[in-house]
Image (spheres, helix red, strand yellow):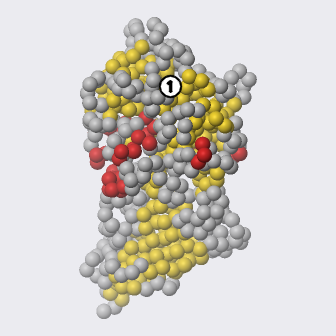
């Protein structure tokens, strides 16, 4: 029987997903293009706008010496005080062990408060030129920090776990003795909790839940309850009394937030983690309620179910890095008691695309202004070893020495036909070359052992001539690296590309295969 050879090109049409299985129906178009609907692995990568997986940058330590004798950093924030001089003053504040510490944008942290509860979960709220610091520990009283002095918050505040600024007031909740009570301060006065313009609102008391999070969103205050039944409530109005008085309106029941630090704002929406580890958006919840299929995290629910440490989800942190259109979520997995994995939601695509960042091993995360990078916002992560790290730096190493692997694995495909035996006659990897680096191209035919081939990334322009042959060339450059030393017969095949060398990059735009099929065409 005559043989027909075709060249097929795989284009990335989806992100990491565990709930779609390990195979996908990918039939070539008339031109030989195949849209890959999801990836079975997308580790330590982000996505370019065309869907191309790109190995993430590495980390460097912000502080040269450990804080709190190497204790876990439970939370970190960026505190700016404008004052009256027209120039802002930055303090980066963290909670580690039993101390609250701050630096002067120089990486040298010093104690500003001691005697806090070990492993407590902090909340940081900027209000009235001060930073209000609270934790979920009943023994920790809320603190106020003005950039110089940190002391107990004045007045008679409730012993709240978290707070937000909304309508020129501090709103607070998470009081153990009154778990369903929402408190608000006087107007423009974070120390007034008993005056005529301060007060409290009961949010479905004795419903079996407690208030677990707050968010100021679109002129309203959103109040989340959990962790069992779940509910979300809206606080409308602008003052305690009068025609525009504060009022509570139920929004949805059956879902809430697991804790305050898992609530994040992105695009024109609000995201949050529920007590089962799933990630939801407010807009989608408004349309579909607690319907699990509408969750942002729907493609990776299997991973969450099998790996998350559900008793410690209140220690997760979710932050939106708008400059990269990603939300970074720290997660304790595999019985870990602190964050040891990062889930990444890329919302530059619709629907969102997920990735996994095991390289960072972060306990908490935040977006901080970096004076060493022309005052641009940077993703920074707090570790379990007393170090804050700048993430996504140019060098692709952990703390300048450690290697990590960018890995992209496609699902198995039968190229439209399980019945026909196919023969692999060649392959190609379409990349934007970054330097004289190597990558590993791997393929697995049916249940046979995976085969690997080392492929050079050298070359960079459309003419396949990398004239600089050193660091990254122009981002628009593209080349196909052809792999001839591949062979095998298959009914289904799985492709993979990895790059795990220190200080080396990978930007993968396409994968290609030359396939021979006896007497038939695979095209639509």
Residue 345 visible in the picture: no
Q: Quadrant of the N terminus?
A: bottom left
Q: Quadrant of residue 95?
A: top right
Q: Position of residue 393 (x, y in %)?
A: 63, 54
Relative side of 170 to 18, left or right: right
Q: Is residue 453 visible?
A: yes
State which quadrant residue 218 falls in.
top left
Q: Name the side, left or right, on which 47 lies relative to 422.
A: right
- Residue 183 at x, y percent in the picture: 42, 19
- Along the line of sight, the residue nearer the viewer: 471 or 344: 344
In the picture as drawn, the residue positioned furthest to the bottom comes out as 1
- 10 Å neighbourhood of mark 1: few (<14), some, or many (≥20)? many
Residue 422 lies, in percent from the top left, at: 34, 83
Q: Secondary structure at mark 1?
A: loop
Q: Residue at x 45, y 71 (%)?
A: 496
Count of marks placed on residues: 1
Q: Residue furthest right?
A: 85
Residue at 27% across / 43% down in the picture?
A: 291
Q: Which residue is mark 1?
A: 141
381 left or right, relative to 495:
right
Residue at 69%, 30% (x, y): give it.
88
Viewer-closest of 309 and 477: 309
Residue lying at 31% horizontally and 63% vertically, measured from the top left: 21
Q: Is residue 279 above or below residue 505?
A: above
Residue closest to the eye, 479 or 140: 140
**Residue 78 is drawn in which quadrant?**
top right
Image quarter of the C terminus = bottom left
On screen, residue 60 above or below 127: below
Quick check: 228 above or below 391?
above
């Amino acid at each position: 029987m005559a043989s027909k050879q075709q060249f097929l090109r795989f284009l990335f049409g989806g992100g990491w997903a565990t709930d779609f299985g390990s195979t996908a129906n990918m039939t070539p178009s008339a031109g030989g293009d195949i849209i890959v609907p999801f990836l079975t692995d997308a580790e330590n990568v982000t996505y370019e706008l065309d869907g191309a997986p790109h190995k993430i940058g590495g980390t460097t330590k912000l502080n040269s010496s450990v804080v709190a004798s190497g204790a876990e950093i439970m939370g970190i924030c960026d505190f700016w005080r404008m004052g009256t001089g027209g120039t802002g003053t930055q303090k980066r504040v963290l909670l580690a062990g039993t101390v609250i510490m701050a630096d002067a944008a120089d990486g040298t942290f010093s104690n500003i408060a001691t005697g806090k509860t070990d492993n407590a979960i902090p909340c940081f709220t900027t209000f009235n030129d001060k930073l209000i610091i609270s934790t979920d520990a009943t023994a920790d009283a809320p603190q106020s920090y003005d950039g110089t002095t940190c002391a107990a918050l004045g007045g008679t505040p409730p012993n709240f776990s978290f707070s937000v600024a909304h309508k020129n007031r501090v709103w607070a909740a998470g009081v153990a003795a009154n778990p369903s009570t929402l408190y608000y301060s006087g107007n423009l006065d974070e120390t007034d909790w008993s005056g005529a313009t301060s007060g409290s609102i009961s949010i479905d008391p004795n419903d079996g839940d407690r208030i677990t999070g707050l968010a100021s969103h679109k002129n309203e205050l959103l109040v989340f309850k959990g962790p069992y039944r779940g509910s979300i409530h809206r606080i409308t109005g602008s003052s305690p009394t009068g025609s525009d008085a504060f009022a509570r309106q139920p929004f949805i029941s059956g879902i809430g937030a697991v804790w305050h630090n898992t609530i994040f704002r992105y695009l024109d929406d609000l995201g949050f983690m529920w007590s089962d580890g799933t990630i939801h958006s407010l807009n989608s919840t408004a349309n579909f309620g607690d319907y699990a299929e509408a969750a942002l995290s729907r493609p990776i629910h299997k991973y969450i179910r099998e790996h998350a440490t559900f008793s410690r989800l209140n220690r997760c942190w979710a932050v939106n890095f708008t400059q990269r259109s990603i939300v970074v979520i720290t997660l304790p997995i595999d019985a870990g008691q602190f964050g040891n994995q990062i889930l990444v939601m890329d919302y530059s695509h619709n629907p969102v695309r997920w990735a996994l960042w095991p390289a960072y091993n972060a306990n908490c995360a935040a977006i901080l202004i970096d004076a060493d990078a022309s005052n641009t916002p940077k993703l920074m992560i707090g570790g379990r070893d007393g170090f804050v790290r700048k993430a996504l730096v140019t060098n692709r190493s952990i703390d300048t020495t450690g290697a990590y692997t960018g890995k992209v694995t496609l699902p198995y495909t039968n190229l439209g036909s399980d019945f026909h035996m196919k023969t692999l006659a060649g392959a190609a990897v379409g990349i934007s070359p970054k330097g004289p680096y190597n990558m590993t191209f791997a393929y697995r035919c049916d249940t046979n052992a995976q085969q690997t081939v080392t492929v050079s990334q050298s070359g960079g322009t459309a003419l396949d001539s990398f004239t600089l042959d050193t660091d990254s060339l122009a981002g628009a450059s593209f080349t196909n690296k052809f792999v001839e030393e591949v062979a095998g017969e298959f009914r289904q095949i799985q492709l993979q590309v990895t790059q795990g060398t220190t200080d080396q990059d990978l930007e993968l735009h396409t994968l290609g295969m030359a396939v021979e099929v006896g007497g038939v065409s695979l095209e639509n």
